[in-house]
Every structure is written in structure tokens, then in C-alpha cells.
């Protein structure tokens, strides 16, 4: 009888260790999946997120934030240089995006007449984007950021009826990347 219980206990422990033994550090099994642009790892809830100019690899830092009308909030505004994963929840009622611009101050970002960041004038200072995504969704992208100052902004412009861009309405924040 004791042998049967010991075998059952050993089998239960083996199953528990097998189920919990992988911490996800070496693969995408801990709620992550490979996919998206540039080979980024994306949370499983991210289906349909488009990342422009993302990077692949293990991030050295993560920044979590929220997008709403008309704010961008981030949990930290300073990270080390290297691969940085930016993850945003759209808690607003409209689609939003996050563009990463190399700039020390939002007021120095060149704009179009409607108040949007001028992608063409930015040139290489526009490092990448988490393209517009719907309310209630979470999207993330990994970007290779050198030391310096960055502006994170929403460059969505609503309609062609003269309304201003989300950036002009205040959807902008800064991020410092240290050496």
C-alpha cells in the first residue's frame, strides 16, 4: 500500500515539476508568442498589432503605458540603452498609435499644418512605430534605442475635416535612454 502511494506521489510531483519547470526565460512559452514585424515577441493578446521598424531579441528594459484621449502615460521615463520593449494598453475610446522619435523636446518635433508629426521631415529620427490599434487592445514592440532623449507620440489625425492630430491634443511624452 505504501509503495502505491509513493508511486502516485512521485508521479504527481513529476507532473507538477514538468508543468512548472519552465520559467519561459529561454523561449516564448510564458504567455508570449513569436511573430509580428521584425520577429518581435508579442503577448498572445496582441493579434493584429503592426510594428514598424521593430527589433528582435531579448529586451534589456520594458516600458508599460496607457493611451487615452488625449494622453500618453508611461510607468517609467528612463531606461538603459539597447533593446527596449514598449507595451501600451489603449484605454481610450479611439484608435491610437505610438511613434518613437529621437528628439529632446516635443516642441522640436516638426509638424504638418494639422498638427501631426511630419514623418518626411523627421527622416531617420523617426525610429519606429506601434501602428494604430483599437480601444481595449494591448500592443507592444521592441526597438533598439541608443542613449539619448526620445519623444513618444500618437500621430493619428481624425478625419479630413480640420480636426487636429492627437499629438497636437497632448498625446506626447518623453523617454530618456541612458548609456
Image: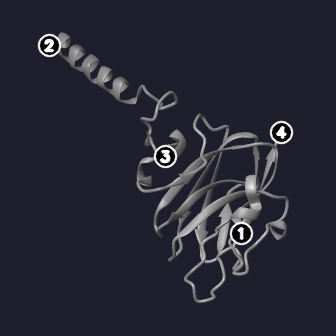
For mark 4, give the secondary structure.
loop
> Residue at the spot x=61%, y=56% of the render?
129
As drawn, the label of residue 137 is none
| Residue 77 visible | no
Kindly identify which residue carries mark 3: 42
Mark in the foreground, 2 or 4: 4
Residue that protrudes farthest toward the front in the picture: 120
- Kind of element beneath mark 1: loop
Q: Earlier in the sequence, mark 3 or mark 1?
A: 3
- Label 4 belongs to which residue? 179
Kindly report the distance in space between the C-alpha atoms of the residues bearing marks 2 and 4. Answer: 64 Å
Residue 140 x/y as whole percent: 55, 52
User: In terms of sequence position, does the residue under pointer 1 or pointer 4 come before the other?
Assistant: 1
Residue 46 visible here: yes
Would residue 86 be found to the left or right of residue 5 on screen? right
Q: Toward which corner of the image does residue 143 lie, by quadrant? A: top right
Q: Earlier in the sequence, mark 2 or mark 3?
A: 2
Residue 5 figure quarter: top left
Q: Nearer the viewer, residue 95 or 19?
A: 95
Report x, y in % for residue 167.
69, 73
Residue 48, given in percent of the width and then of the height, sits at 42, 56
User: Mark 2 — residue?
Assistant: 1
Closer to the observer: label 3 or label 1? 1
107 over 24 or under it: above or below:
below
Residue 146, compared with residue 89, is above or below; it is above
Identify the residue under disc 1: 117
Which of discs 2 and 1 lies nearer the camera? The answer is: 1
Q: How far apart, in angstroms, are the residues tagged by discs 3 and 4?
A: 26 Å
Which of the two discs, 2 and 1, labels the residue nearer the N terminus?
2
In whole angstroms, how far apart are the C-alphas of marks 1 and 4?
A: 27 Å
Q: Residues within 10 Å of mark 2 (few under 14, many from 20)?
A: few
Whichever of labels 3 and 4 marks the residue nearer the N terminus, that label is 3
Amino acid at each position: 500500500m505504501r509503495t502505491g502511494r509513493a508511486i502516485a506521489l512521485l508521479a504527481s510531483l513529476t507532473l507538477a515539476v514538468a508543468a512548472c519547470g519552465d520559467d519561459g526565460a529561454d523561449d516564448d512559452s510564458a504567455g508570449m508568442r513569436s511573430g509580428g514585424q521584425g520577429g518581435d515577441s508579442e503577448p498572445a493578446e496582441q493579434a493584429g498589432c503592426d510594428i514598424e521598424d521593430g527589433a528582435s531579441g531579448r529586451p534589456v528594459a520594458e516600458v508599460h503605458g496607457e493611451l487615452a484621449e488625449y494622453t500618453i502615460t508611461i510607468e517609467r521615463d528612463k531606461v538603459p540603452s539597447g533593446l527596449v520593449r514598449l507595451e501600451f494598453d489603449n484605454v481610450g475610446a479611439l484608435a491610437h498609435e505610438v511613434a518613437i522619435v529621437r528628439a529632446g523636446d516635443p516642441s522640436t518635433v516638426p509638424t504638418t499644418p494639422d498638427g501631426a508629426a511630419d514623418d518626411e521631415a523627421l527622416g531617420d529620427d523617426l525610429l519606429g512605430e506601434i501602428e494604430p490599434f483599437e480601444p481595449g487592445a494591448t500592443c507592444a514592440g521592441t526597438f533598439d534605442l541608443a542613449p539619448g532623449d526620445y519623444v513618444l507620440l500618437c500621430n493619428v489625425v481624425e478625419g479630413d475635416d480640420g480636426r487636429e492630430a492627437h499629438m497636437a491634443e497632448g498625446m506626447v511624452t518623453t523617454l530618456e535612454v541612458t548609456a
